[in-house]
Image: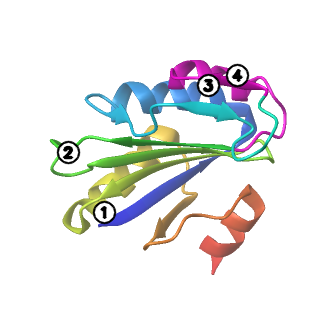
Amino acid sequence: MEDIYIAIEFSKRNESIEAFTQKYLKGFTETDGYYEYPPFRDEIEFETDDYKLMISYVLQREKSKFRFYFANAANNETPFAMMFLNEDGSLFLGLGVHSQFASKYEQQLENDFKSSLIMFCYNTIPPDNLDEFKSIIKG
């Protein structure tokens, strides 16, 4: 299993979330049944069991960091998906892909989001910001 992430800049964040949801998350369910913002803090500003409501809430805040995870055990190619909203305003969209399908989904993500900012992560998560993401993929 490999995780593939594509980085999206702030200006395309909302439309990219919509496109990713429509194309890649059909049949998926969110893995966290409950969300609170900010995560892992004593004082909670907002809480809900509706991930779409939480995405909307987080997108209204500048420099917000939040992660969403999705699963679909029936999907034989990409059983997992992720959305990482970062404090710098960037967005990382990810797919957990079985290795034999990695190049297929790399190409699909590149075509669908018109970006070559793609990173493969093996048992790790991507960095927290777009600059570091770009630095890592330049190698």
Residue shown at 60% from the left, 72% from the top: 137
Residue labelled with disc 2: 73
Disc number for residue 57: 4
Which is more toward the observer, 21 or 73?
73
Region rendered in magenta: 45-65
Q: Which amino acid does label 3 sit on?
A: Met
Image location (x, y in percent) of residue 120: 46, 68
Q: In this view, does 76 lie to the left or right of 28?
A: left
Question: Of helix, strand and loop, which one carries label 1?
Answer: helix
- Report how far apart the C-alphas of labels 2 and 1 lie in the structure: 21 Å
Q: Mark 3 points at which residue?
A: 54
| Pointer 3 local density, CA inside 10 Å: few below 14, some 14–19, many at least 20 | many
- Amino acid at dot 2: Ala
Q: Which colour scheme is used?
A: rainbow
Which residue shows up at 27% across the image and 50% down it? Answer: 78
**CA–CA distance between discs 3 and 4?**
5 Å
Q: How far apart are marks 1 and 3 (CA)?
A: 32 Å
Label 4 environment density (alpha carbons within 10 Å; few <14, some 14–19, many ≥20) = some
Do the residues under discs 1 and 3 have CB atoms within 8 angstroms? no
Residue at which label 1 appears: 103
> For the residue carrying disc 1, how many other residues have a C-alpha within 10 Å: few (<14), some (14-19), or many (20+)?
few
Distance, label 2 to label 4, CA atoms, is 28 Å
Q: Which of marks 1 and 4 is nearer the N terminus?
A: 4
Of callouts 1 and 3, which one flags the residue occurring earlier in the amino acid sequence?
3
**Is 80 left or right of 37, judged from the image as shown?**
left
In this view of the protein, which residue sits in the foreground, 111 or 58? 58
